[in-house]
Image (spheres, helix red, strand yellow):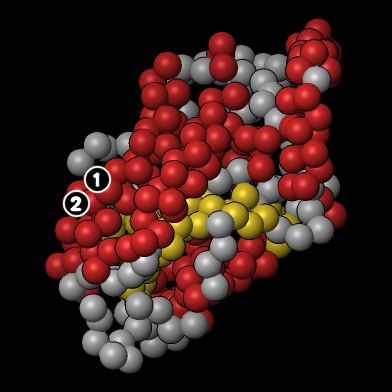
Amino acid sequence: MPDAGSPKVVLVTGASTGIGAAVARELARQGYSLVLTARRGGRLEQLAVELRQTGVEVLVLAADLADPATPERLVSAVVARFGGLDVLVNNAGFGLPTLFADAAPADLRRQLGVNFVQPLMLARWALPHLIARRGTIINIGSAISSVPNSALGAYGATKAGLAYWNDALRRELAHKGVKVCLVEPGPVQTEFFRSLEALAPPGGRYNPLLDAPAAWMSARVEDVARRIVRLIDHPRRRISVRRRVVWPFRLIGGLFQIWPALGDLALSSMTRYFDRKGDLARTHGRLGDARPSE
């Protein structure tokens, strides 16, 4: 157990931008000790300089979650520095701006690893320390898993798998005092959609079903971060962002489960429409460092 009065230690993945960076800022504002990880070490260091001005301790661990050895190394480094871990925020993830048939197999494999496999492995390596401190695991899912569609087929599958595992793990660990929470934020005002647009080929575009939603449909990233951090002291099984499009997604998804033919007709027709217009541009080559929000 941590010393009485010492700040809790929180590991945040995908902390260099978007929801991860906003969560880190909110945690720092509330006085937590932070461990930040992402591929982009330079951005992490910039964020760490900002956060340390609030007086909190920040450990930066630049790492690629696609590397199978990363989860064990991250947890070992956290424990070596702080003696334990109180909260794991599985936030890292990325989408591919293309249809499944056009995605490079290597990119799909990486997406499955970063979005689904590695959150499980991070939790597994962290579990003894989280049990010792009766800690918390917060998994960042997605409302898109409620409505399977061609815009984010593999991405949605990783988030649906994360939700299933989240519920199973919560039930497994309840009697050991570890809280397991799922966040389904829906569209959020981050650079995610801008990054997808930046990957469009000259004279073309990627899947238009991935266009950024209107501002009134998107949550402010600061609001999402506050709700996520609140789960540490006030855990809940699953949360979304109020007054946004998450609940309509769930309602539509429920309707399509009751009437699958309707879902097939609606989403297949939409994809066919854009394909005939020539808007579903093909990807060529690897995504490289242009991947958003990893």
Residue 281 screen position, x and y as percent? 67, 16
Residue, far left: 80
The disc at residue 73 is: 2
Residue, x 40% and y 59% (percent of image)? 174
- The answer to whether marks 1 and 2 mark residues whose Cβ atoms lie closer than 8 Å is yes
Q: Where the C terminus falls, by quadrant?
A: top left
Residue, x 76% and y 60% (percent of image)? 242
Q: Where the N terminus falls, by quadrant?
A: bottom left
**Element type at marker 2?**
helix
- Looking at the rendered structure, the kind of residue marked 2 is Arg
Q: Nearer the viewer, residue 76 or 40?
A: 76
Q: Residues within 10 Å of mark 1 (few under 14, many from 20)?
A: some
- Looking at the rendered structure, the kind of residue marked 1 is Thr
Residue, x 42% and y 30% (percent of image)? 112
The residue pinned by badge 1 equals 70
**113 lies left or right of 99:** left
Residue, far top: 276
Residue, far bottom: 5
Residue, x 39% and y 75% (percent of image)? 49
Q: Compute the Cα span from label 1 to label 2.
A: 5 Å
| Residue 73 seen from this side | yes
**250 lies left or right of 53:** right
Residue 148 screen position, x and y as percent? 67, 26
